[in-house]
Structures are given as structure tokens and as C-alpha cells.
Image (tube, coloured by chain):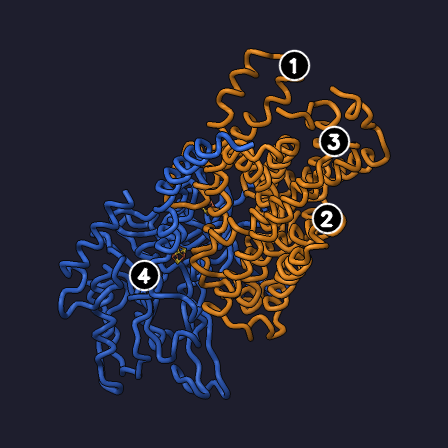
Amino acid sequence: MNQQTRSIRMWTPHTLALFLLMAVGLGFMAYRMTYGLGAATGLNDVYPWGFWLGFDVLGGVAMAAGGFVIACAIYIFNWKKYKPIARPAILTAFLGYLMAVIALFLDIGHPFRLWHPAVMWQVHSVMWVVAIHVILYTTTLGIESSPMLLEKMSWQRTLALVKKIMVGAVVFGVMLSTLHQSSLGAVFLISGARMSRLWYSQFLPYMFLISAVAMGLAMVSMEAMFSARAFNHKVDREVFIGLAVGVRNTLMVYLLLKIFFLVKNSSVAAAFDGSVAGNMYLAEMLIGVIIPLALLLNGRCRRSLNRILLVDVLVIGGVLINRLNVSLFSMDAWSVARGGGYFPTGSELMVTLGVIALGTFLFKLAARYLPLFEEG
Amino acid sequence: MAATRRDFIKLSAGVGLLAVAGEPALAAGAELSSGAVGLLYDATLCIGCKSCMVNCKRVSSEPGGPLYSPGGTIPYEFRGNDRIHDSPDDLSAKTVNIIKVYKDGSGMRKDKVRDGFSFVKRQCMHCIDPACVSVCPVAALTKDPVTGVVGYDGNRCIGCRYCMLACPFGIPKFTWDTNDPKIVKCELCRHRYKDGDYPACCEFCPTGASLFGPVTELAREAERRLALNPGSEYAFPMGRIGSNRYSKRKVVGYFRKVYGLKEAGGTQCLLLAGVSFDRLGFNPGIEDVAYPEFTWNYIKKVPYLIGLLLVAGAVGHQLTKDRE
Ligand code: SF4
Ligand code: SF4
């Protein structure tokens, strides 16, 4: 452990606030576990999936995409300059998945049957495919982040072994998460009868994958920037600029596809018709794609760390909106026609906040006690 | 399983097994099981007495039925202080069969679009290739290999509610108000078959509007009715096909479609009506495709994608080895 990380103070008001959020979240979790989904959430027969699924699960997994993108860049394509951010990136991925798994646990009607898919196979179900991915990938992420722990514990033999299988583990992990990101989009392929054509297309899995790459890069960049400030950890600005270029390129591809499918499956008019779906579509596009892209296409902006941070926040927000759009707002017209309505309850929001607080706290803990910012 | 089954479907479609001349053509891509049973609901015969709803609720609350709960209470839905009439608004975890009504203008003319009205029965369609079965990650929903009835096993179900999202008809419902929830939907009274009984809605229908029987025969019966001249007299079979009970009535003009022959790839429950099915509340966005195909087109690529990505990763690593 070096001098820098030692200087991270654990018991700050910030940490206490996190603890408070976690405690409140835990309380609401207990409420859900005791009284069931109907009591704790705003879900109903017309809106069977809500905020936990759309935000925590879909958003959490998209957030985790930074892990595989960076691991891919460093270990597969040997871009060594990103090495300093490898561990935080992989750790973030792990935390993103943790968030998704906690939400899934709470969201399914029978939390203690979460293991059923592992033994009751049903290969036709994307949900099953997703479940198997989560299990395998969380294991892989565990291996990928284990060097930190092993270094800390000075288990040299195991460390050497892990380093030997690292590239293999990374290739495997990249394969898994590529498929996992797209499979989450594929979940909705069968729901076309109730989804707005602003989002629904047979290409949905790949749209999820591409937007997840953009979000993952933005996430890593933002999180490295925050930790650079908070933990006094210096990262070369070229790294951020490189990440911003990655975001830009991904967004350009994404924008073209978005426009293509808008015209092909729906119409430009549908986006501007003032409906809930149309407005949400515009919000997603402006916040997550068009404004960030406009900023990034300006060479001067691209070299300003503050601007890059702004872009990161916008992209992350935009993709999170996209996930909520696909899972909730795209079904708005269908559901309203059937007398349904949904608004997340306090429990749903507080549990989500609690889980985010837990993730932040764990990250802080790792930054303090593990060699998070050392090269592995 | 999937590959072989689907290949067989292609094969059988190719040699025309499914589209023998003169038979009502079921949608390609769907394959009826040998003993497939279903319903034919004819809105022009329905008088809206809701006998089917009453008896459905009673019978479904018996052990083995979808509404059964230990203790055996029948989940009536009373409105206000009226403790007499079971009056559900829609399908729910307490109601798996409902008679709804279409109404226009003065609402005086039965089975007519303008100034008319029509009843409609809503319940699980028992799709030939059901979306709900294909999405369930733990095979809690299954299609009986013989009868084709889509049944539910609450002990496997994890409560993910993907089936609710996937069903194009919006049929599966969830018991939200408990901590030990389950999915509820019509299971075509499969718990009554062993005693030789058949779905209560058909058994207790006084007009033959709900008719039970083998799907192929129901489809033939439906096509026959479509061919009848309005105003002529016809003996409508009652209860189940082969019961030898008939109700003789004048034929009303039909909307020219047997709903369920093609919708969602074909369903085992078929409908006839005097007005269009859009007006009766069927989502016009439902396509004539077996819904699992949408997903399967993706899933079947997964093994190849796995191989491709692994190779690409390994090659990429080797090629860029000397990069600084
Ligand atoms: S109607 Fe819905 S619930 Fe019934 S079999 Fe078809 S997909 Fe399943
Ligand atoms: S809620 Fe139950 S029956 Fe429906 S898909 Fe999930 S596990 Fe299967």
C-alpha cells in the first residue's frame, strides 16, 4: 500500500451518509421480504416489470460494461496505456453486477429460488441465458479482480496462477459480457406486441451492446476522474482523451443506427408527436447521444477534462434513460390503453439508492485497503 | 429439442402435412400436438349470462385448479358493499375467464358494429407455440405434449414475471398481494380431464357459445359456420364436440375471420364474432407469427457467437502482442 491510498480517510461525513442510505435501503428491503411485491412496489398486472428491473438490473449491467471494454483493450489488444485504470474498471463492473443481482433477488417473486435456473434448464428462454451469464461472469470478474486481494494477502503462488490464466479469463469474460449485454436487449424481442416501434426492432440486442460500450467507457472515465480527485490518484490525461475518443466513435455508430431504425420501423414524426414515448425518446437521444456527440466533435472540448466529465455524465444518464424507455416507457401506450399505470414507490427508490450507496462504499473500501491503483 | 422440432416443422410444412387441401390452414411454424384440445367461442351465440365465469371460478378453485388455495376459498371480487355479484373488471389473479362487451351508439343491435354490441370471452388462448412457455427460465410453464394445454407449476416458478411481459395477449397474472406469489391463468380445466370432465365454461354454457373439442374439429366447425348463409337455420353443437346436444338457431352474419387460426402462430382457442376482433379488444399489433421465433432467431446464434468471440479474442491477443 502506498502513501496515497493510506491518505484516504474512511470515516468521513460522506461515508456516514452512505451508511444512512444503506440502512434505510435495508429497512425497505426487509419490508419487501416480509410483505411481498404488491405492498412494496408500484407493480401491477399491466406493468409487471418496473424500476428495479429497468434501472438496477438493466442499468447496473450496462454500467458494468466498462469492465469488459477496458479488460479487452488491455489484455486482448495490449493497449498498455489503460493499465492504470484496469482494476478500478473491473471492480466497477463487479459492483454493477452486484447491484443487478441484489435487485434481481428482490424483484423476483421467490427470491430464495434465484438458483432455480442453474439447475432447471430451459435453453429457449433469454432469461435463462441471462441468468447463466450472470453466474459465469460474476465468477470471472471475481478471478479478474482477485490479484488485488491476493497481492494484499501475499499469496504468491495463487497470484502467479491467476496471472497465468488472466488472458484466458479475460477473453472468456469479454465473450460472456458481450453476449450478456446483447441478451438483455434480446429479452424484449418477444414483447413486440406491446412496445413502441421507437425502440422495438430485431436489432435490439445489438443496440443494447453498442450503447453499453459507450456507457461503460463513460463510466470508467467518470469514475477514474472522481477517484483521481477524491483519492489523490493521478491518471494521465491521455487516458481520458483516449476514452473520450472511444465514446465519440461508439456514439457515432449508435446515432446512425438509431436514425436508421427510427426511419425504418417508426417515423421521425412519431418522435415528435408529443406522446410520453416520443418525449422520452427525444430526451434519451438529446441527453445521451446528440449533446455529448456535439461536445466531443469539438476538438477543444475533447481536450478539456471538465468537458469530458460532462460528456460522461450525459452519456451515462442517456443510456440509463434508454433502459427505462425500453423496459417501461415503450409500453406506455399499450398499458394506458389497458387502464394501467405505474410509478415507482418510495421502497423501490430507496432500495435502489441504498444499493448505489453500498457500491460506492465498497469502492471506497477497496480504494483504501486494496492495491486498487497499482498496476497488476 | 428445439432444432429437431423446428426442422420437423419446416419439413412437414414443406411436404404440406399441415395444409392438406380442404382443411383449414393453420399458420406455418406451428404444429398441433396429437390430442390437441381447445375451445371455440362464438360471440353470436353468447347471451352474456356469465354462467361460464361463475362456474369457471368455482371449478378453478378446486384442488389442481389455477385459483386453488389451501383452505379452498373462492376468490370472488365484490364491488362496494354488494356481496352478491362477483364483478371483476378484467382478468386477474382471481379471474381467469371473463365475458366483456363491445358497445357502440345506442347499443341495441346484437353483433353489429354500428349502434350495436357484442360479447367477447377472454382467457388464455393456449397458443400452439406459446410465448410464455418459451420465455420461462425454469420451465414452470409447459405445454402438454398430448393435449397442448399450457399448464403452470408453481413449485418451479421463481416469479420473474417474464411470461406476463411476453404473452402477446397479456394473459398471465400475478398474485401481487402475497409474499408467496404465483402466476395465474386459465389451464383449460386440465385438472378435470381425469374424471372425464371438460372445461366448465363449455359444460355450463346454455347456448353452445363456448364449445370444447379437438382443435382440428373446432377449426372445421368454425369454417363451416363462416360458410353458412345469414338467416338460415343451423344446429350448433353444445358443450363438447360429439355430445349430441344441439341448439337450433338462425345464423347471424359473421365477421369473416376465425380468430386464432393464424394469430401468434395459431392458438388452440378459436373465436368467431359478428364484429371485428380489433373492436373486441384484441391487439391489432399481434402478428401471425409464433412469438418464440422472435427470440429463437437470436438465441440460435449464441453458440456461434461464443465461438467467434473466443477465436477473435485469442487472435487479437496474438496479433497485438508486441504493441507498446
Ligand atoms: S395466450 Fe399467453 S398465456 Fe396463453 S398460451 Fe399463449 S402466450 Fe401463454
Ligand atoms: S414468473 Fe414464473 S412462470 Fe412466469 S416466466 Fe417467470 S418463472 Fe416462469
Cα gap from disc 3 to disc 1, whole angstroms = 19 Å
Chain letter for the orange colouring in the rendering: A
- At x 55%, y 68%, the residue is A333
B171 sits to left or right of A313: left
Cα gap from disc 3 to disc 2, whole angstroms = 20 Å
- At x 36%, y 40%, the residue is B303
The numbered mark 3 sits on a residue in which chain? A
Cα gap from disc 1 to disc 2, whole angstroms = 35 Å
User: Camera-side residue: B190 or A328?
Assistant: A328
| Residue behind mark 1 | A153
Rendered position, B294 above or below B79: above
* SS label for mark 1: helix
> Where is residue B250 shown, x and y percent of the image?
27, 83
> Where is residue A8 shown, x and y percent of the image?
81, 28
Choose mark 3 or mark 2, whichever is in front. Answer: 2
> Where is residue B105 shown, x and y percent of the image?
50, 87
- Contact, mark 3 vs mark 4 (Cβ under 8 Å): no
Q: Name the disc covering residue A309, or none.
A: 2
**Mark 3 or mark 2, earlier in chain:** 2
| Residue behind mark 3 | A364
Q: Residues within 10 Å of mark 4 (few under 14, many from 20)?
A: many
Q: Is residue A86 visible?
A: yes
Q: Name the amino acid, label 2.
A: Leu
The numbered mark 1 sits on a residue in which chain? A
| Residue behind mark 4 | B265
Q: Name the disc covering residue B148, or none.
A: none
Rendered position, B9 above or below B82: above
- At x 67%, y 17%, the residue is A152
Q: Residues within 10 Å of mark 2 (few under 14, many from 20)?
A: many
Cα gap from disc 2 to disc 4, whole angstroms = 49 Å
Q: Residues within 10 Å of mark 3 (few under 14, many from 20)?
A: many
